[in-house]
Image (tube, rainbow, N blue to C red):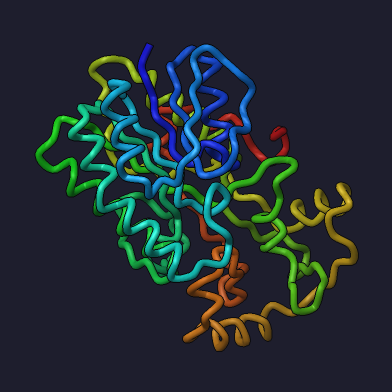
Amino acid sequence: MKTILVTGASGLIGKAVTEMLVSKGYNVIATDKENDPFEKADNLSYTRCPVTDKDTISDLLTKNKTNVLIHLACTVDNDFPAVLSSEEEKTSAAVDKYLYKAAVSAGVEDIIIISTHQIYAPQKTREPIRETMNEKPSSIYAKIKSDSEKALSAALKKADTKGVIMRVCPVYTKDFTDNLKAKVYDPKDGCAFVYGYGDYGYTFTCLYNIVDFVNGILTCPAGISYPGVYNVCDSKPIVAKDIVETLRNDHKIGAVMSRNYGSDAVKGAAALFGSKAARTDYRYNDLSIACSNISYDNTKAQRISTFRWKFTNTK
């Protein structure tokens, strides 16, 4: 079986991916700055170190004859906090500077990295956003991931190593609802809210769709060309009223206000211009486009995985 090194292995995404890899019988080398969260397994080794530890990570890649690098560190919901500072920018830049080159030098066959939907430029139509559409990273997190994508592309330019970039929409599970809540909760008012009947929606990604997609890349039949950029997200947006209903049933929010979208949209557009929160907070909710029903097209990714998980059947 292949030997796979996973960075950010103890985070929300990293832990789920690592556990899948172990269950599939891969030889897994998990790394993270946190303590080992895994049960012992013969095909799993854990090294506690920050992903910026160039010498340790490079040695792990080389000495273990690594076939695949799955880079999940430097990621919101996996490693970084929701509100980013210059420190996170420096950390990611330091990793970009060495990691992909080290993997190529070690003879790694595949590199899979996680990026973000925030890379795309604001859309002027309601057409689903595809991987070929214009990019314009405006937040700190979007720039971090854009730079990481560019660093990977540069490292692979003259290499045989294949690269896969997952542009992931906000992640959720039945228990992890922070990204869902951010779309229907106003921390200033301390209250949840909806516009009208709440029949507008947002595109999210069930954690287990990411796990299935990674497995799909690793098990692609010979002859299938899979390197490239993919929108990894649920096939259908989740509407605001369903988010509110679920969170209320799980006692994760209390009262819900009905608000006027027109006035909030004007306020949101005014607040967005030069807003520090919009640049630094991954979960910033731009009220000026809240009802725009912006969606992301995962048709390309569905050639790799079925995306069977959705809001109603997640665990």
- Determine which quarter of the picture holds residue 282: bottom right
Write the residue at 37% across / 19% down: 3
Q: In the figure, 108 relative to 239: above or below? A: above
Q: Quadrant of the C terminus?
A: top right
What is the x, y in percent for residue 77?
57, 50
Q: Quadrant of the N terminus?
A: top left
The furthest residue to the left:
158
Q: Nearer the viewer, residue 142 or 223?
A: 142
Write the residue at 85% across / 67% down: 256
The furthest residue to the front:
55
Write the residue at 38% across / 42% down: 113
User: Does residue 133 appear left or right of residue 46 in this picture?
Assistant: left
Q: Nearer the viewer, residue 177 or 129?
A: 177
Write the residue at 45% across / 22% down: 28
Decide if residue 297 is in sight here. no
What is the x, y in percent for residue 177?
71, 50
What is the x, y in percent for residue 203?
57, 52
Q: In the figure, 185 relative to 239: above or below? A: below
What is the x, y in percent for residue 205?
57, 44
Q: In the figure, 274 relative to 239: above or below? A: below
User: Does residue 132 appear left or right of residue 261 in this picture?
Assistant: left
Q: Nearer the viewer, residue 82 or 262?
A: 82
- Determine which quarter of the picture holds residue 178: bottom right
Q: Nearer the viewer, residue 133 or 45?
A: 45
